[in-house]
Amino acid sequence: MNTKNKFFISCEEAKHICDKTQYGEASFWEKVKLNVRLSWCRITRAYSSNNNKLTKLVEKSNIDAMEKDKKDEMQRKLQEEMSKY
């Protein structure tokens, strides 16, 4: 693999790395390649920007999830009802 191909990635790969970065799973070199792509690709920049906005909105939303024991109880009741038929 030549040096040029090490740093230039496809738009799809950039989106994947962007998603990994959002969850703290991207390696240092993936971040470098993503930043190279972001420097010249407006589509990737837009995707990254929207990804960042979504992350901030989700973090700010303070959504309360259902507790695990209540969820398990609902699932058990659903299974009971479905087994009747």
Image (spheres, grey):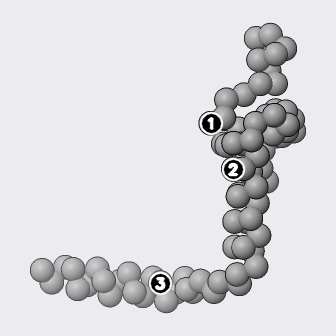
* Tags 3 and 2 touching, CB below 8 Å: no
Q: Is residue 68 in sight in this rendering? A: yes
Rounded to the nearest angstrom, the CA distance separating label 2 from label 1 is 11 Å
Label drawn at residue 71 = 3
Residue with the mark numbered 1: 12
Q: Is residue 25 visible?
A: no
Q: Is residue 47 left or right of residue 65?
A: right
- Which residue is depicted at the point 38% across and 81% down? 75
Q: x, y (%) of residue 73?
A: 42, 88
Q: Residue at x 63, y 86 (%)?
A: 64
Quarter of the image for the C terminus: give it.
bottom left
The residue depicted at 72 percent of the width and 73 percent of the height is 57
Q: Nearer the viewer, mark 1 or mark 3?
A: 1
Q: Mark 1 falls on what kind of element? A: helix
Q: Residues within 10 Å of mark 2 (few under 14, many from 20)?
A: some
User: The residue under label 2 is which amino acid type?
Assistant: Tyr
Residue situated furthest front in the rendering: 42
User: Spatial distance from mark 3 to mark 2, Cα to Cα?
Assistant: 34 Å
Q: Which amino acid type is shown beneath numbered disc 1?
A: Glu
Kindly identify which numbered label has been placed on residue 47: 2
Residue 54 at what x, y percent from top left? Answer: 69, 65
